[in-house]
Amino acid sequence: MKSIEQKLHVSLAIILILILSGLLIFANFSTRNMLQTFVTSRLEHDAMRLHHALSFEDGIQVKQKQLDPIYKTPYSGHYYAIRIKQPASTTLYSPSLQGKTLKTPWVKTETTLRDIKGPQGQRLIIQVKRYQKNGRDIVIAIAEDMSLLIEKRKHFRMLFISIGLVGLISLLLSQHFIIRRQFRQLDNTRTELKQIGNGEREQLSEDVPTEIYPLVREFNHSLSIMQQRMERSRNSLGNLAHALKTPLSILMQNLDNNYPAIKQAKRIRQLTDRELKRARMAGLGNTRQRFDPRAELSTLVNVLKQAHQKNKLEVALQIDDSITQFGDREDMLELIGNLMDNACKWAKSKVFCTISIKADHFTRIIIEDDGETKPTQELEKITQRGARLDESIKGHGLGLAICKDIVKLYGGTIHFKQSEKLGGFLVEVLLPQS
């Protein structure tokens, strides 16, 4: 199952990481270009001063007074080299090089050399430019140590990454809080769905975000239509049974001694009595209610005792404390009602109903009586529609087949055995917990 909340978290996190990565790359290149632009502009300025300080009056020399003293400080990180092609190739180096040389290629206009290894392992950036002075071609190379600036740049980059990570974590936490807060409204909808399942609500609240409002509205509409159809169906069935009861009584009184006709009329009456009993079992509850055995079965037992006028009929219930609501109310009343109704028909004086939880997470329903049992071969045919094991007892042979259909609908199993405790008939139903 895919979670929209998790997908939003992942998607937004990826977007934030990509944005911060892009900002890091941009900041890295921007600071690098900014530093190089700043340094090269300063080197061009020093090259112009060096060009003016170059003199050919008393031989080729540089007037040191016109230069910054840093070019005379040993290994200061600021160096220069001057190459003069005419009349003979001559190269002048700054005193700061302490007799060491500096790479000065012959260029047509100008070039910039980066990350050149200088004295004492310094990392130099060299600006090389071609000039003309007194009819001579001159190439001036100005160098500056970038080691300190590179370290500062690394420090800035690490600081930027640290701030970016803190910002990313803060944004992710804020994003989680905001999304969780917005999805908390869906938690209310989830709670309402459980309440509908338990019969505590009729519909979902429509005070929801705009994005899910159409879904909630359609769900409520479908729920309302289903409720109306089920109520109409149940009311129609009850009305039909009531309407048939009186004409059947009059018909039976006027059939005289026509035994086959009387037998069929009695059968129709049994069917109408059964439907009326089902209506009494279902009561006026919400058709979407979950089945609460503690609240429902006591009423069911009273109805069965009234329907089966047997002397000293004992109907006992045993429900484990771990049992909660399960299944649809009317389905479970249909299932347990039919099974207990049959047990009351066959019982001599005792009917026990036990509901418990098995270790493999199944709801276990056992209904047993102290009546006469049947051979195993006959028990295997009991769920066939119309099959009856005792023709002397009223019934139409549909109840247990309907029970089997309900159990199959829930993905459970139903078994028929002999009761070791009471000696009569035993039905065991296993339903997966939902």
Image: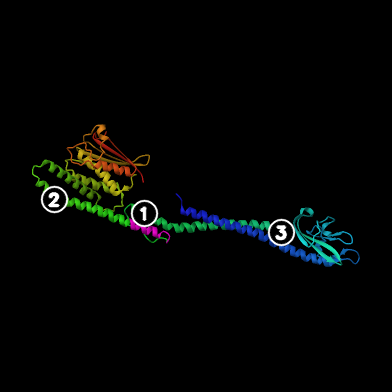
Give the amino acid type for the residue marked by disc 3 in the picture: Leu
The quadrant where residue 416 appears: top left
Label 3 sits on residue: 149
Main secondary structure of the magenta stretch: helix
Q: Earlier in the sequence, mark 1 or mark 2?
A: 1
Q: Please report the bounds of the magenta region as a residue range.
A: 210-222
**Callout 1: helix, strand or loop?**
helix
Q: Which mark's residue is nearer the viewer, 1 or 2?
A: 2
- Number of marks in the rendered image: 3
Dot 2 crowding, Cα within 10 Å, few <14, some 14–19, many 20+: few
Residue 12 place in picture, x, y as percent: 52, 56
Give the amino acid type for the residue marked by disc 2 in the picture: Pro
Q: Earlier in the sequence, mark 3 or mark 2?
A: 3
Q: Residue at x 24, y 46 (%)?
A: 300
**Callout 2: helix, strand or loop?**
helix
Q: Residue at x 89, y 66 (%)?
A: 56
Label 2 sits on residue: 247
Q: Is residue 203 visible?
A: no
Disc 3 from disc 2: Cα separation = 108 Å
Residue 265 place in picture, x, y as percent: 15, 45
Q: Horizontal placement of 77 versus 261: left or right?
A: right
- Please tell me which residue lies in front, 419 or 315: 419
